[in-house]
Amino acid sequence: NHRNKLPPDKDNSASSNEYYNKALQQRHNYKTDNFRVLRLDELGFIPPCDISGRESVSALHRAKSQFCKQIIANISCLMKTNPPYPKRLPHQCPTNDIKNNKTLGCFRDGKEFKLLPGYKTTLIHTNSQDYCSDLCLQSGFVYAGVEYGTECFCGNETPEWDLKLSDTFCDMQCPGNQSQMCGGHYTINVIKTGVSKFVARVASEPLPNLQYDKSPVRIVFLLTLNGRAVRQVYRLIKALFHRDHYFFIHVDARHDYMFRELLKVELALSNIRLSRRRHSTIWGGASLLSTLMDAMSDLVQSSWDWDFVINLSESDFPIKSNDKLVKFLTMNREHNFVKSHGREVQQFIQKQGLDKTFVECEARMWRVGEKELPKGIIWDGGSDWLALSRSFVDYLVTGDPLISGLLQFFKYTLLPAESFFHTVLRNSPFCETYIDNNLHVTNWKRWLGCKCQYRHVVDWCGCSPNVFRYEDWNRIKNTEKKQVYFARKFEPIINLSILDTLEVWLYGEYPTDLKNRMSYWQNVYHYEDIHPAPDESLLKIGTSLARIATKLLTTSQTTCQIRSLDKLLQVFTYHHKDQFRGFLIQYEVIVSNSSTKLLLESWCWPKLQGIIIHNRDPINRLLNFIVSSDFDQKEQMSRDFIRIISPHTDPVLIHQWGLGDQSFIVTFLWLNPYGELANVTSVKIDGSALIKFVKPTLLTPLSQGIWTVLLVYENVTMAYTQFLVTPSQTNRETSISASQISFISKSHNYEQSLYEWENVIKVFKNTIKFEMKNNINDHLKTKMTSWIDSLILSAYSILETCIVIPCKSIGDCGLKNLVTCAETSWSSYSPDPKSEIISINKEFGTL
Ligand code: UDX
């Protein structure tokens, strides 16, 4: 019924029906490059134009809501006929741009030029005859730019200087404390590998009569946060806290827990404020620029007295003291710090997708085609981590045709915050305040970080930096003399020791009795959460374990009243010394015949690990062998510590191998809870140390119960591992019975595989007596709850239980033996002084 699917602004009058039918006839099909067809009745509305572009059609097919489809269609059409941004933008930079102005390109001995007001920079000598080169000196930095595209590296004659290699130019930072400028004489060698050499000497001095405002700058730390690493955010705030500085915090609109926890901090500290204008800030999304611009406008309008805004995320951390940062910015108060890409501009534009149109809806950036960049301006971009001066932010918020034009353009652009600020700076009256340094050291490991890992939220292959681990410490330590003040990324669930080492380096040794210095807790469920929606399987596991723990307490205390589980409140993962050490379930129980509710926490462990049967060469190289989900290719680990696999999860087999001197093939046989072969995968293991993962193709929903994966080498099962597909009451009827599985599998050449592996499986079943908690008839007979609990118990164990507040009235009950949570080392109630924000000294901000 097409009538009901007309767009909301069309009525059902005869004329609109006529229009609809005509359009339907005329544009019956939209053929695309890959011959997929877009049908109007599928679309449910008439798009403003014929949409034939492959990307738009694909986006329209994939988008779910009518709202999103309509935006995609509208923007696709608009881009073709009348792009919703200016064709030309004004370049308002009063002086020539450093790197793009070719008239500054070749210097002669003694030529003098003024780069920044108040600085005199002179090229004293050059012996370069080979090629044209920009050489300039700017506050705090020396640039030696070679022709775009030539490969070069920098060297110098004063070894204590730090030099950086980049594609097209080298930047050199001033030695020691000369943070404001590089006065004096410097020698720079730029060597074009194996071809020629360029040596230049430059001198720079401040011109006399330069007046500086020497009062220390006040900084707004603009935190854009997502996720649940609350204790890490507390630690970050604590490290940066000072009564003269401010925190303006935006939490992704989909992350309730982080927002609620930070509201408590906002209440306690007046220089911390949470933005109430919340966006769903997806990775690379246009919404990240709206978030930053909203925040800047709120900051300009606020009564806070500030000089700089620095944006940071939950995974940033300072690598120099606040004092040093303040000193540096105080001496550079009119400057703006952004990091440029360091490539040829056209190459950057393409790599970044600036010339592609993106539409943001359904928390995704949909690519719908090309777009033309407005002319008349210099394009620039790089990192989206910035330190911007008050005057520039005032200018951004006030706006002018350059800013409004660029904002319109970046509404349809991926990763807008990586280019918007750079481009405004370069083309605005603030161009001379541009400093090519984002004050950050970033842990780029592109061979790991560029795996298209954001495909679930953007139609693009994006890259991300890696998390710093203890092994990376030298990278941070080596920045001591550089003008960098922050590093990214840090994630305590992956590595906490690097943060510990960093803090000791910054602030000195901790007191020897500091509790839980190497422990970290991260919440994964809170009963008040609406967004993101709690994971049903996690709830199932948590509730079942709480029920089992309560039962254990009841039965072990003969004189005690029966207690029953009231509610699962929270779940945390617990990490100690950079190892996952289990998870904590926090729950309320009711003491019968009274209204007393007790708050308990139990420490649990996912116990299904890999088991080696024959520990001989080459299988003795096997270090880890588990099935989990949510494998992070960048960090080479599963983020699903609890190992929650629901009937609809894609399980992933993770196998890790130590170094060896030969290659060999292993085969993985996946047996479902009925002991039937469900998948066979062979993998080649070479001599290097490897973490590998295998994603099998399995029929979904997966059968509930314990699955087994055999590792077969030369027709012998050498090791096996098991995993639980979480049972679910609601899914019971959808689970596939044994006979169904056989039937389906048979139609997939199953018999051939079965025949081949039958003997291996038979031998394994005879050798290893493992329980098959599977049979659908069994669990229909018994009570569902006890079936679920018995399954959960075969995959998880309860290590210990503690009580949050010991209650005298229940002392007789035997619970008096229960340890108080705060006294344990594992409970989420155990003291965590490194992250306790309430202990901030409001005067000075340090402990
Ligand atoms: C960084 C840069 O931000 C990006 O521009 C560059 O291309 C790659 O390096 P990455 O480290 O991958 O990206 O992003 P991350 O720090 O995870 O996220 C960027 C910002 O978006 C953070 O402030 C983060 O809190 C926020 N974000 C991310 C959300 O608010 N919600 C999300 O779902 C994801």
Image (tube, helix red, strand yellow):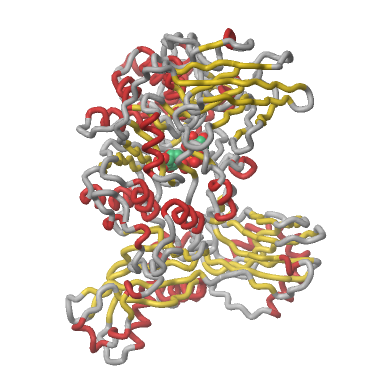
Q: Is residue 833 visible?
A: yes
Q: Is residue 164 above or below residue 46?
A: below
**In the image: residue 38, left or right of residue 810:** right
Please give the name of the residue rendered at 32% of the width and 72% of the height, measured from the top-left corner.
822
Comparing 538 with 123, the one in front is: 123
Q: Nearer the viewer, residue 261 or 549?
A: 261
Q: Position of residue 595 (x, y in %)?
A: 17, 75
Q: Position of residue 230 (x, y in %)?
A: 36, 53
From the image, which quarter does the N terminus lie in? Answer: top left
Q: How far across and down, in percent of the image, does residue 481 sit?
A: 52, 40
The answer to whether residue 369 of the structure is visible from this angle is no
Considering every residue shown, the one lying at the far bottom of the view is 559
Decide if residue 535 is on the left or right side of residue 10: right
Q: Nearer the viewer, residue 304 or 17?
A: 304
Quarter residue 300 falls in: top left
Residue 351 rendering spot, x and y as whole percentages: 59, 27
- The quadrant the C terminus occupies is bottom left
Q: Give the vertical position of 752 relative to 609 (above or below).
A: above
Question: Residue at coordinates 29% horizontally, 19% vertically from top-left?
Answer: 398
Q: Is residue 366 above or below residue 652?
A: above
Instruction: Look at the picture and state if 235 lies above or below 706.
Output: above
Q: Is residue 529 left or right of residue 668?
A: left
> In the image shown, does 590 or 702 lie closer to the viewer?
590
Q: Which residue is at 64% across, 65% downward?
A: 624
Picture mark count:
0
